[in-house]
Amino acid sequence: MIYLYLGNYAESNSELAFMAINTYLKDLDNADGKIRGLALRSLFNLRFQGVLEYLPSALVKGLNDLDPYVKKTAIMACVKYFYLTGAKIDASKRFFNSRRINSE
């Protein structure tokens, strides 16, 4: 429930959202795949400028995860990341190269 609250009010209360980012990043290391996927999805639902620096590392973690739900969530987060940052396809090579190296 708190994930939904933070997603809705992150723009108006960015201090609270900054404090929650650390919790999301800790949840990405949880043993349960559902918690990791929910944390990744919630992290990418935050809409304010300060969150952008934390997203790439969380995205790579999600793409390298073995759980199918987390991996699916990370793939959807890739689209959101490029929508938020306006990054071009060339900037995405880092993510996809790291994914290819890990699969070999």
Image (cartoon, helix red, strand yellow):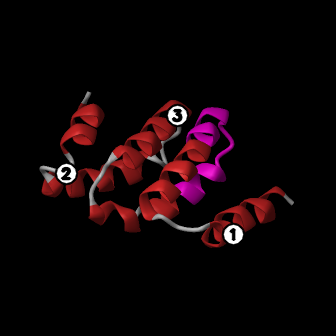
Residue type marked 3: Asp
Residue assigned mark 3: 32
Q: Main secondary structure of the magenta part?
A: helix
Left or right relative to 70: residue 44? left
Residue 22 sits in quarter = bottom left
Q: In the image, residue 86 lies at what x, y percent? A: 48, 64
Residue at (26% x, 27% y) in the render? 1
- Disc 1/disc 3 C-alpha distance (Å): 29 Å
Q: Nearer the viewer, residue 88 or 67?
A: 88
Q: In the image, residue 7 lies at what x, y percent? A: 28, 40
**Residue 36 lies in magenta, yes or no?**
no
Q: Is residue 31 above or below residue 49?
A: above
**Do the CB atoms of the residues marked 3 and 2 lie less than 8 Å apart?**
no
Residue type marked 1: Lys
Q: Is residue 32 above or below residue 62?
A: above
Q: Which mark is residue 11?
A: 2
Left or right relative to 15: residue 71? right
Q: Is residue 52 above or below residue 91?
A: above
SS at badge 3: loop
Residue type marked 2: Glu
Going from N to C along the chain, the mark reached first, 3 or 2, is 2
- Report the span colored magenta: 59-73
Residue located farthest toward the top when viewing the structure as drawn: 1
Left or right relative to 55: residue 98? right
